[in-house]
Amino acid sequence: MSRVRKPLTVQPWLEAKVPGTAMVMAAGKGTRMRPLTATRPKPLVEVAGTTLLDHVLDHLRTAGVRRVVVNVHYFADSLEAHLRSRAGDLEVAISDERDELLETGGGLMKAKPLLRDDPFLCVNTDNIWIDGPVDGIRLLASHWDDARMDALMLLVPLARAHNHNGRGDFGMDPWGRLSRRKPGRMAPYVWTGIQMLSQRLLVDPPGNAFSTNIFWDRAIAAGRCFGVVHQGLWFDVGTPSAIPKTEAMLADA
């Protein structure tokens, strides 16, 4: 776990044991973001003058993360060059998937030897969030209970999931324990792409390439998958049409 000096901020400083390492998921082909991803990887698409990857790295720095593990596949050289030029203050480890795109679960399994912390943070690069009264990542970390949890997700209410066209991902009981959306139903919460995971989950892969859903289903079945509600703004930025909408809302934030 990392120890950081409290930054100058108008937000209340939330005491939390933030993992020193974060896995940043950056290997996907970004097919929903075409044509913008015809010449660059999705994490290097810009929103409000900043790449999606840099939006994530800025939040990680602020929360106290000092080391990132980044998986690469599509335009891998471009991602590595960007990290060398923009992430010099962070320790960066590359999980190389050039030979085979492993999806999210397979990507975590390949990166496991590089993940020094347990639990560790894991963050997608196709969303943007603005913190509310407290830092979202520190809020997540403050709720981690290793005795009860294998997975802890930062969620946003479906009604506040900007640009998101889904029907919700999870229900949550009064103790924060998560359940899947029932077929044909709506669910009240959407996953933000930000989570904490225990390395206890990273076992028995069903193959090389598979979804993180496998790990989540195991944690849910064991009653060890929990959620925390993000108190700020969140934007799904998975398609080109979401970019101007997000920029307009950010300008008014």
Image: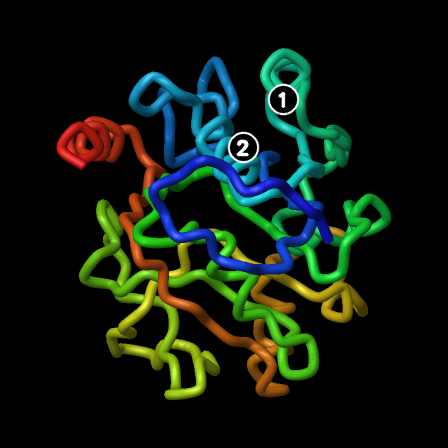
Which residue in the protein does label 1 denote? 87
How far separated are the C-alphas under marks 1 and 2?
8 Å
Q: Residue at x 48, y 38 (%)?
A: 59
Q: Earlier in the sequence, mark 1 or mark 2?
A: 2
Query: x and y percent of residue 50 in the render?
Result: 39, 20
**Amino acid residing under circle 2:** Leu
Q: Nearer the viewer, residue 17 or 33?
A: 17
Disc 2: CA contacts within 10 A as few (<14), some (14-19) or many (>=20): many
Taking 162 as reference, is 155 left or right?
Answer: right
Taking 243 as reference, is 209 left or right?
Answer: right
Q: Nearer the viewer, residue 177 or 179?
A: 177
Query: x and y percent of residue 122 in the render?
Result: 60, 51
User: Under tag 1, what secondary structure?
Assistant: loop
Q: Nearer the viewer, residue 251 or 206?
A: 251
| Rendered position, 27 above or below 174 | above
| Rendered position, 133 above or below 40 | below
Q: Residue at x 31, y 53 (%)?
A: 133
Q: Residue at x 24, y 63 (%)?
A: 158
User: Under tag 2, what secondary structure?
Assistant: helix
Marks 1/2 in contact by CB < 8 Å: the verdict is yes
Query: x and y percent of residue 212 in the render?
Result: 60, 60
| Rendered position, 22 above or below 45 | below
Picture quarter with the C terminus: top left
Q: Residue at x 51, y 44 (%)?
A: 124
Instruction: Say which quarter of the image contains residue 245.
Output: top left
**Amino acid residing under circle 1:** Ala
Q: Is residue 12 visible?
A: yes
Q: Which of the numbered marks, if any, corresponds to residue 57?
A: 2
Disc 1: CA contacts within 10 A as few (<14), some (14-19) or many (>=20): some
Query: x and y percent of residue 57 in the render?
Result: 54, 32
